[in-house]
Image (cartoon, coloured by chain):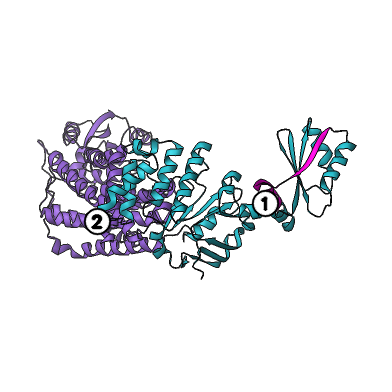
Amino acid sequence: MSSATRLLAIVKKEVRQLRRDRLTFGMIFGLPIIQILMFGYAINMDVRNLKTAVANQAGSHLSRQFIAELGETQVVDIVATAESPAALEAMLRRGEISIGVHIPRDFDRRVVDLDRAAVHLLVDGSDPTILGVANQLRSMPIGFDVGIQPVEKQSLIEIRSFYNPEHRTPVNIVPGLMGVILLMTMMLFTAVAIVRERERGNLELLINTPVSSTELMVGKVAPYVLIGLVQLAIILGVGQLLFDVPIRGSILDLYIAGSAFIAANLALGLLISTAVHTQFQAMQLTVFILMPSILLSGFMFPFDGMPVAAQYLGEILPTTHFIRLTRGIMLRGAEIGELMPELYFLIGFTLVAMTMAALRFTKRLD
Amino acid sequence: MNKDFAIEARGLSKHFGDVRAVSSLDLDVPRGQIYGFLGPNGSGKSTTIRMLCGLLTPTEGSATVLGTAVPEDAKSLRPRIGYMTQKFSLFDDMTVFENLQFIAEIYSFPATDRAARIDELLEKYNLEQQRKQMTGTMSGGQKQRLGLACAVLHHPELLLLDEPTSAVDPQTRRDFWANLFRLAQGGTTILVSTHYMDEAERCHRLAILDHGVKVADGTPQELQAETGMHIVEVIAGDPYAAQAAIQPLPEVASVTQLGVRLRVLLPNSIADPVALIERALHAHNVNASATTTSATLEDVFVAVTMKSSERST
């Protein structure tokens, strides 16, 4: 009974202080919106308009037709011409172009010769995405309106893209982005919440009252659970409104996954707060966890492509599991029952981190 | 365990690495009295108070507070003590009323009496005007009154106050002490640390701490009577010249200037201290009068801290 009173007192106090902290309050709602707009529009894996220069040494009708068709793909944007492959290389080195197209003198003859490549692409391999795009160009057919028709190569493999047939990047980004945004705000707010009271001296007063460690911890994070769910709604709403990101599974499943993930992040934030002494240290530790959560969680790069060690590291990050859940539910229309291992991990993580935090947070100063 | 004592400590020590913040402290604080800790900054006052309320674990020794062993049973003790930290520790971004309400809830003060108790405290501690004011915008004196109001809200048997008046003006200090006496009258035991002599003088009993060691304890009167020192007051037209004449004497323990007066401390073993001083003044052609006088608490403080530094060298 009195335990509930104390818990409620802490929650009330937290909400009251939060409401008066305009910057934090603004961040709660502003941060998800700004981030989803930023990432939704800026991150685009579907590359177009790569700067290209052409060295056409053939000068034939066919070669000019090829260049015209190359331009029409919109993958490349032909910005310059060069005399020789060496000149192309120099432009590539200076960063003026990303792709150099070299059409040799005997282009017309090479086109019909299946053993020899007709065109050389010089590609800036320092950016892996460009290399990938250049590979796409290899399959570009060359149409002839004169002379001999080339033998059509039969493709061995046909691709059927499930879940995102139009290859729209926001569809892939938004479910992952939900994880990153929630991680950032939830972890940071709670990590700072306890440390701030330590810095201001409030903690010395609090630990001298009958309030228990658990009451204090739970009371401090409880308001953030609600805030996290509101953030989730904002991201989903904006994602659907502006980027047409589908939710093929059930919203309820998504909220179950979201609640588990929010709890995991809050527990992580509390754990951080028990390990540091200043808000600045809390911030640094938060970034330390944020970076691998963005890079190793499967948000930016496919999980399977990473080295095994990195995969293990990725497996202990809650974000990895949440992104699997959101992609599963939102894009593949999976039910939460099909993704239970991920949910179990999040629940387990929360329990472990919360217990560790409560144990570490002794009501002592030494 | 003696029922007459609110706090009993034996051999209480706290070391932070190589620093001995508190060394073998014995303490007996009688119930219903105001007990003072007098000592300069860094003498171990805060550390001792924190050990007594279970915030710090003693390196050695034991303490019993209100019959409860600390820090082992600090949890059961918490509802029975009030603690006012040295640094203001209430919430700046909440109003006076909200802070009091929060404290009432945290201590599970009966909901039906809560509003009445808060009104009573606001009136008693002269904070009615500030009821809806943000705590962060209040003056030092107002904050201090709020701190005390929050510390006593749940009617604690023992009040631990860590330098409560270090940030306020003399008038506020006087009012604050009036509040303390009223609380003591009502049966509350109060342990208060200070570095002000005039405050120490108001305590029923006090302990003088120096470098973590208790160098003296007793009532202010006892301490003043038992300095083991003669106090000679010298009134001179030129106090600098008088000081120059007296200071070099091997018998003189300390000379303190107070305006045109000098307070000279000499050991009790000297038979006629006034004659000794007068001879020295005469030898240096300084025109001054010397008379013995009774010790103030400041003299006591100088005398005992001097002894302890002699011991350590």
Q: Is residue A115 visible?
A: no
The relative height of residue A195 versus residue A363 in the rendered view (above or below) is: above
* Residue type of the residue flagged with mark 1: Gln
* Residue that lies at the very extreme toward the top in this rendered image: A80
Residue A316's tag is none
Q: Mark 2 lies on which chain?
A: A
Residue B224's tag is 1
Q: Can residue A66 be seen in this view?
A: yes
Q: Who's the residue at 40% across and 51% down the image?
A: B152
Residue at the disc numbered 2: A261
Element carrying mark 1: helix
- Tell me the crowding category of disc 2: few under 14, some 14 to 19, or many 20 or more residues within 10 angstroms, Cα based: many
Q: Nearer the viewer, residue A295 or B268?
A: B268
Q: Nearer the viewer, residue A67 or A116?
A: A67
Image x and y of residue A39, in percent: 24, 41
- What is the span of residues highlighted in magenta in the rendered image? B287-304
